[in-house]
Amino acid sequence: MASGKKEFLLKAKLTAEENKQIIAMAKQLGVSRSELIKSRLLANHRQVLINAAKLLVLLDGIGAELGRSGNNINQLARHANILNKRGMLDGEIVTEFHALFSVYLDQHLEIQKLMRQIIRLMKS
């Protein structure tokens, strides 16, 4: 939004339902009604208001889940190394692990791309 002295007032008549919708949307996004209306009227049509607090909580959850996945992979690799040293590692298990790990890496790269897109959208 443009900065400067705010000296003009915009008025609009709303039905009770429209007013409830605007209040609910502003509350959901964590912004004032004024900010919501200005962003919708003046902003680029691509710009989307988001509830930053909720987004951060969700991103934190994704980060925690990725951390748990990495920990599980490390435990599986450690166990596989122990079995391999004892000559007890089955080739089929290794093949299946490689296939599943390939899927995991693809998904991890997709998450990274999406995170970069979110960051770019938040900057613009």
Image: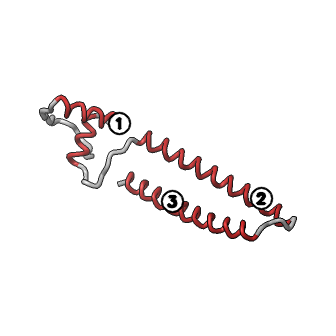
Disc on res. 85: none
Amino acid identity at mark 1: Gln
Q: Residues within 10 Å of mark 1 (few under 14, many from 20)?
A: few
Q: Quadrant of residue 18?
A: top left
Could you tell me which secondary element the residue under label 2 belongs to? Answer: helix
Closer to viewer: mark 1 or mark 2: 2
Horizontally, residue 47 falls left or right of residue 41, namely right
Left or right, residue 116 beside residue 102: left
Quadrant including the C terminus:
bottom left
Q: Nearer the viewer, residue 101 or 109?
A: 101
Q: Residue at x 25, y 35 (%)?
A: 22
Going from the N terminus, do you reach mark 3 or mark 2 first?
A: 2
The residue that mark 3 highlights is 112
Q: Is residue 55 above or below residue 17?
A: below
Residue 100 position, x and y percent, is: 62, 64
Alpha-carbon distance for marks 3 and 2? 26 Å
Nearest-to-viewer mark from 3 and 2: 2
Which residue bears the numbered disc 1?
28
Question: In the rendered image, which quarter is residue 75 located in?
Answer: bottom right
